[in-house]
Amino acid sequence: MNRVFVVLAFGAAALAAPGAGAQPKAMPVRFDFRVLTEDGAQVRDLKAEELSLKVNGKPRQIQSLSRFSTVSDKSSPGSDLPPPYASNAAGASGRAIHILIDDDSIAPGREAEVREAVRLITSELGPDDRVGVMTAQGQLNIRPGADPTKVRLAVDNLSGRAVTKETEQDAQCRTVKLLAALSTVISVSGSTPTTIVLFAGGMSPPKIKQVQIGSLNSSAATNDLCPVTTEDFQNIGNLAGSAHADLYVFHVTEGMVERSTTQAAGIESLAGVTGSEIVRLNTTAQPSIARMLRETSAYYVGTFEPDPGERTGSPMRLELRTTRDKVRVRARPVIEIPKETKRAALKPQDMLRVAGEHHELPLRAAAYTSRAPGSEDVKIVALFEGVEPGATLASASVGLFDEKNTLKKQWTAQSADLAKRPHTAAIIAPPGVYRLRVAAVDAAGRAGTTDYDLLAEVPRADPLKVSALVLGTQQQGTGFAPRLEFSGADAVAIGLLEIYGVPKSSTVTVDLEVAPSLNGTPLANAQTTVSQGTVEDTRIAFGGFSIASLAPGDYQMRAVITLDGKPVGRVVRTLRKTQ
């Protein structure tokens, strides 16, 4: 990384509320997908212009594109750093994995491959991942949680229930029950990407009913006790598309007493309607499990604007391709454009005071502390924004709660406060430990809350005091713009720090470092420009780095403070770069 120096005019109004701007717009339609290399590795730097999208055969313009990581990438810089912000975005930290086992298609004594596969899954999960397991008829039902050992032990004690001689009618009835169980799992998976892992020895394919014309009993050919239809499978595909569920189908090829090409065809039909992949579980499962966990470690979210009249709630065909070589897009083949509905009006002020959380609107938030002039109190500046680039907040409130969970301070946004991302709220409060809650409603009526814990103080760097380190950027023709996370469009990362109690005759210098971990060797150093603040004993340090060459990940920015040539302290902050 090249060393750069940033010398810019800066005033105390750098974090002031932005001016008035655009009016709220109707929410675009979101669709999520994964972009993978041939060996299942994540593609981190995909651009919207590298994608082509069609909905019901019509080309659509991708308005925004964001990448979300569901796990800490151990190979990524900064994996030991604290997160740069708090977020209520489900899947932003940890995966939700639902394991569904069709034990009725696995014969007693043939469970070993399933047990080994589940053992591999549970042993490779991260601390934030959640996993659950259920069987097709509900004899085993453990909701996703943070105890993978409980799931593994439950599967170790599971016995197959497949009959020795299964008739076609028996197989169809078993398939109907399996599809119903799969529908239940998809329905409870939520609105953010969820991984569903199905283990089955086989299932009946959809059957086209034939009626013999002229028969005295025309119903004789259609009186199946458990008919399996094309619509049954298509409904699963539609449900998976609207629920954002990724399905991995593990075909236990030796699970049934008698192998059947018909039962294998049913597995293929399910994979086709859900856009999932089939793993033939007839040898070691380790490579397939490792690939699945690699593939589910991140996902992209794109948005597009639907045509008038398309918000019907009906499923539509989705086609997504990329122009990049040796890269494949994994997207569900259908999408549901929600109906325009009137929602009960939610007020952010009311959402502050209730214990319940709102996750429909993904938010992120952080807080910074500085000195309140002429007071022993602390100035707390909260930064918050919708996680989705196209999200427009219609209303927002910020509340500050003490250790007794008492609301001590409250801030409510005016329209001008929500015109520019990230949004800024300033609160003055006594020093102490607080929980800062951000509550917001977007232009589509979705509600979200997220909580950020902070110690409100002005840290000492004896004999000085300092503010928190504020991170931001600067683009051509604009001033300092704070950032909660950085993207490839941000050329530089700037650190801003206030120093208090500086004697008149003393000289303060501040050097910035950026490092890959808590105690890692700096990748680069940069000097800052230290200028006089609005108060006589205050100095403002301002400088930054080029981050164009930084790979996506978390880094630590450090501000090392020196008074008259003697180091007196340092302030740190996590810098997150996405694509």
Image (cartoon, helix red, strand yellow):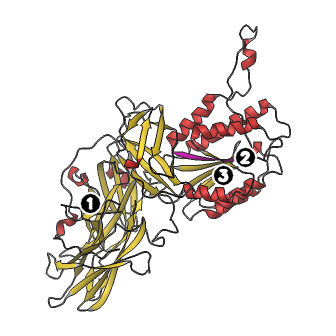
Q: Find residue 429 and report its horizontal and vertical position in percent.
A: 27, 69
Quadrant where the image shows the N terminus: bottom left
Q: Please report the residue visible at 30 percent of the width from the left and 52 percent of the height from the top.
A: 396
* Residue under pointer 3: 133
- Separation of disc 3 and disc 1 at Cα? 43 Å
> Can residue 360 be seen by looking at this rendering?
no
Question: For the view shown, which residue lies furthest in the front direction?
Answer: 325
Circle nearer the viewer, 2 or 3: 3
**Element type at marker 3?**
strand
Magenta-colored stretch includes residue 136: no
Q: Earlier in the sequence, mark 2 or mark 3?
A: 3
Q: In which quadrant is the C terminus drawn?
A: bottom left
Mark with earlier residue (1, 2) = 2
Q: Which residue is mark 1?
A: 424
Q: Is residue 443 above or below residue 371?
A: above
Q: Which mark is residue 171?
A: none
Task: Measure how far apart labels 1 and 2 are at the Cα level.
Answer: 51 Å
The image quadrant that residue 218 belongs to is top right
Q: Tell me the kind of residue under disc 3.
A: Val
In this view, the mark in front (1 or 2): 1
Which residues fall within the magenta stretch?
244-255
Q: Classify residue 16 as left or right of residue 457.
A: left
